[in-house]
Amino acid sequence: IGTAVMTPTTNNSTSPSATMPATVPPTKRTPNDFIFGKVIGEGSFSTVYLTKDIHTQKEFAIKVCEKHYIIREKKTEYVKREKDILFYLSNTPFIVRLYYTFQDAERLYFVLSYAKNGELLPHINKVGSFDVECTKFYSGEILVALEYLHNMNVIHRDLKPENILLDENMHIMITDFGSAKMFKPPIDRNRARNGAGAGMNGCNDDDDDDEPRRRKNSFVGTAQYVSPELLTDKPVTPSSDLWAFGCIIYQMISGLPPFRSRSEYLMFQKITKLEYEFPSGFCDKARDLVEKLLVLDSEKRIGAKDSVRYTSIRSHPFYEDLDFDTLQQQTPPPIY
Ligand SMILES: Nc1ncnc2c1ncn2[C@@H]1O[C@H](COP(=O)(O)OP(=O)(O)OP(=O)(O)O)[C@@H](O)[C@H]1O
Ligand SMILES: O=C(O)[C@@H]1CCC(=O)N(CCc2ccc(Cl)cc2)[C@H]1c1ccccc1Cl
C-alpha cells in the first residue's frame, strides 16, 4: 500500500472560497496568543490545558512539556518524533491535528485540536459496553483512520481506547504518536504478475537504529493491546495495529480487553499463547471478525494482504450495512 497513497480529503472549512477570504496564514505563535484555561489532562511529562486563541476565539488543547523533565527521562527523540509525525499527518481525517508548536526557556508547547468529549474509554465504561450499532460505527471510524495512517506509511503501535479521543460531534481523533513509526513500503516488483501484492502490511527491514533509545527487549505500546510480534521483537508491520483493532472491538462489545492479568508477564503469556475467550452472548459476527484479527501470525490477519483500503475487513458480514466512506458526515449513534 505504501506506493498507492490515498489523498486524504481535507476538511473544507479552511479552504478559501470566492466569498470567504483565505484564512490569515498563521504567524509564529507564542503563549501570549492564547488564554490558558483549565487543565484537561496530565501525561507522564506533560500537562494539557484547554486554551482559546485570542485572535480567533477558537478553542485548542495545548500540551505543555517541561524540558528539564524530558531531558532527564531521555525522551527528547520521542518528543521530536511525535511532533514530526503529527505535522506529517496534519489534516488527516480522524487524526488529532497539530496546528503549531513553540517553546520558551523551560517548556515546549503543542497546539492541538481540542477533543471536547475526551477519551473513548470512559464512554465505554460508563455504559459497560457498546451495542452493535455503536461498535460498528466507532470501530469503522478507527478502521478508516488506520487506512489513512497505513497509506501514509505510519504505524501507530500504541492504539488503545485511551488514545482515541472524541471531538464535540463525537467523531474520533486518534492521538499519542510518540510510539508511532514510519515504515518503508515494500518494493513490490512482482505485483503486476502475481497480484498478491504485499498490501498495506509489507514489513520493513528492521533497521531499528532510528528508534528512540529504548531498553533492549522493552516494547512500545501498552501491555493489554500489544501484538505478539512486538513482544518477540519481530519486524514491525501495520498489522500490529490490526491486532490492537481486534482487541478494541472485543472491548467495545464485552466491556473488557481480551487479555487481562494482574501481572504484565502473565498477560504477555496469554497474548503469545492466544489465551482468551468470548463471554456468552458475544455477537457472533463480531466474534468471527475478532477471531480473524487476533491471529498470532501477523501476515495471516484479515486485512494483512489488503492495499489502499482494508477491503477484506470492510466486506466482513459484521459491517454489512455500514457506509465507511461517509462516516465523517454521519451523525454518530447515541451511546447508551
Ligand atoms: N487534543 C486533546 N484534547 C483533549 N484532551 C487531550 C488532548 N490531548 C491529550 N488530552 C488529554 O490529556 C491527557 C494527557 O495527554 P498526553 O498526550 O499529554 O499524555 P498521555 O499520552 O496521556 O500520557 P503519556 O505522556 O504517559 O503517554 C490525556 O489523558 C488526554 O485525555
Ligand atoms: O523541531 C522543531 O520544530 C523545533 C526545532 C527547534 C527547537 O529548538 N525545538 C526544541 C528542541 C527541543 C526538544 C526537546 C527538548 Cl527537552 C528541548 C528542546 C524544536 C521544537 C520546538 C517546539 C516544540 C517542539 C519541538 Cl521538537
Image: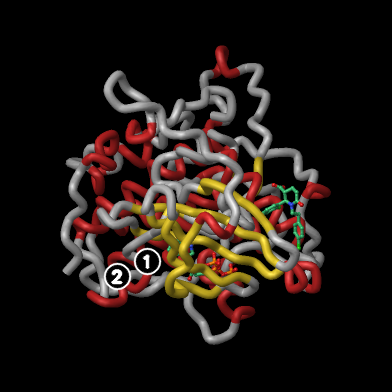
Residue drawn at 40 percent across, 61 percent down: 248
Badge 2 marks a residue whose secondary structure is helix
Marking on residue 118: 1
Report if the beta carbon of the residue with label 2 is closer than 8 angstroms to ligand 1: no
Question: What kind of residue is marked 2?
Answer: His
Residue drawn at 25 percent across, 48 percent down: 318
Name the spot of residue 14 as percent of width and height, x first: 38, 34
Front residue (pair 211, 322):
211
Image check: 65 left or right of 200?
Answer: right
Report if the beta carbon of the residue with label 1 is closer than 8 angstroms to ligand 1: yes
Q: Whole-Å distance between the Cαs marked 1 and 2?
A: 9 Å
Image check: 266 left or right of 256?
Answer: right
Marking on residue 308: none
Q: Earlier in the sequence, mark 1 or mark 2?
A: 1
Badge 1 marks a residue whose secondary structure is loop
Question: What kind of residue is marked 1?
Answer: Gly
Q: Is residue 295 visible?
A: no
Name the spot of residue 292 as percent of width and height, x first: 41, 51
Residue drawn at 67 percent across, 24 percent down: 187
- The number of numbered badges drawn on the structure is 2
Name the spot of residue 27 as percent of width and height, x first: 57, 40
User: Which quarter of the figure has residue 64?
Assistant: bottom right
The residue that disc 2 covers is 123
